[in-house]
Image (tube, helix red, strand yellow):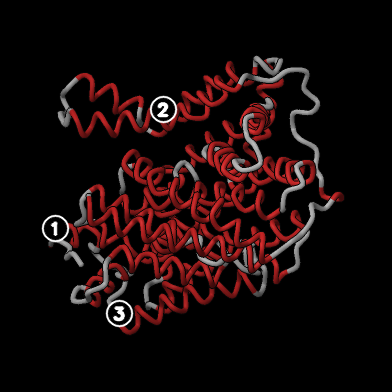
Amino acid sequence: MTRLSAEMLAADTVDPITSAGHAQLGIAVLVGIAVLVLLITQTKLHAFLSLTIGSLALGAVAGAPLDKVITSFSAGLGSTVAGVGVLIALGAILGKLLADSGGADQIVDTILARANNKTMPWAMVLIAGIIGLPLFFEVGMVLMIPVVLLVAKRGNFSLMRIGIPALAGLSVMHGLVPPHPGPLAAIDAVHADLGITLALGVLIAVPTAIIAGPVFSRVAARWVDVTPPDRLMPTRPSEELERRPGFGVTVFTVLLPVVLMLIKALVDIVVDDPEDGVQRVADVIGTPLIALLAAVLVGMFTLGRPAGFTRDRISSTVEHSLAPIAGMLLIVAAGGGFKQTLIDIGVGKMIMDISEDWNVSALLLAWLIAVAIRLATGSATVATISAAGLMTPLAADMSSTHVALLVLSIGAGSLFFSHVNDAGFWLVKEYFGMSVGQTVRTWSVMETIISVVGLVFVLLLSLVI
């Protein structure tokens, strides 16, 4: 495991707000996370309030002055909102435009029209991957469920054979690929390069989704045989529209921010001259804020206008896209506050002091921490943010590619074995009409496969890059 340079270590641990020893800090971390877990799982308190209270408990047990803890938490909350808040908002707007205009349905229908019985599971994972790029997991699932149920029923497919690939495509994107909130928050916490993380994330996401989707679905279909529940057959968002945008222009709009960010990463590698005009232009258009803003503005014309949206309808769509993300934004922000509290009480230095002689890879350590928090809280976002906060000091002395792999390792760990304390578990159970046991044997196992396979590919890439 790499050691922090004296300069980077000092930068991350200047004036710690407590002089507690390693034992006290370790207990403080356990108490802080335990409080967080109990509040979320037992009292069902909102994750934003749980993270806030957990941060205060963390500082108090560490022996830090309460006013300093509040300052640290507030600073972390503010910096996280500044770093990822606007990006989450822009991603939500783009996703809402995609859904309301019928663009998502256009992608779905076009691909399904070209798929046969053998290729249908592969078509489903492809659709979910494309749809999942700009959409939150829950939104993408609401869009995909009607397709999954209809295809399974009309084509006489096993629901698992169709549903698992769709869920795998959505889940992989949610955990590994920005601009989803978890990866964005981890990128911000460990100061990773977004373009490199995006490129490596897509590279890992493709084989991971294939293994956990079409491949595992064969096994899942033998384990669980359920029929699509008629009572849960929802209507599709675009059924009320007279027309909708074309397939090509919709895919172009969805992939525009991804392409712009990848161009920046490529130019940075090839040119590597901050004064070069091409690189300066690429650095601007490939900035996540500009890339997503460009996609939103383009989407108003390429998605909204072909669907017949007036200016008022587009304005209403934008307005309605922001309200549902308020809770997510507050959770991510509070997670940033929790992360900053961990750093300021000196937990980062403690981890370095304890682990500097270990033979455990930093990537594996990050994955294990994320797995533990995921199992305890049920939240992939909370697991990602908390693990990123604990691993921040280790990232300071890594190369840009390995910092990106650290983010992906955390993201993979945050997906491990979704069970009864995860809202996604119940969403899948109810939509697919399964029992708890059936959901564990399908959805929970699929999430575990994504997590483990994702880690394997991260470790393999770390040997090559």
Q: In this view, does 458 lie to the left or right of 352?
A: right
Tell me which amino acid carries mark 1.
Glu
Task: Find the residue positioned furthest to the left.
Answer: 6
Label 1: state its secondary structure: helix
Tell me the CA gap for discs 1 and 3: 22 Å
Mark 1 / mark 3, whichever is N-terminal: 1
Closest to the observer: 379 or 26?
379
Q: Residue 290 carries which label?
A: 2
Q: Is residue 353 left or right of residue 183?
A: left
User: Splitting the image into 4 quarters, where does residue 456 fall?
Assistant: bottom left
Tell me the CA gap for discs 1 and 2: 32 Å
User: Splitting the image into 4 quarters, where does residue 246 fall?
Assistant: top right
Q: In this view, does 415 lie above or below 34?
A: above
Closest to the observer: 317 or 425?
425
Q: In this view, does 83 lie to the left or right of 38?
A: left
Label 1: which residue? 7
Mark 2 / mark 3, whichever is N-terminal: 3
Specify the quadrant that holds the N terminus.
bottom left
Image coordinates of residue 142 in percent, x first then y, are 69, 44
Label pair 2/3, CB-CB below 8 angstroms: no
At x 49%, y 25%, the residue is 295
Mark 1 / mark 2, whichever is N-terminal: 1
| Mark 3 neighbour class, 10 Å CA radius: few under 14, some 14 to 19, many 20 or more | some
* Nearer to us: label 2 or label 3: 2
Image coordinates of residue 232 in percent, x first then y, are 82, 49
Tell me the CA gap for discs 2 and 3: 43 Å
Label 3: which residue? 20
Tell me which amino acid carries mark 2.
Ile
Closest to the observer: 261 or 55?
261
At x 37%, y 78%, the residue is 63
Q: Is residue 113 left or right of residue 298?
A: right
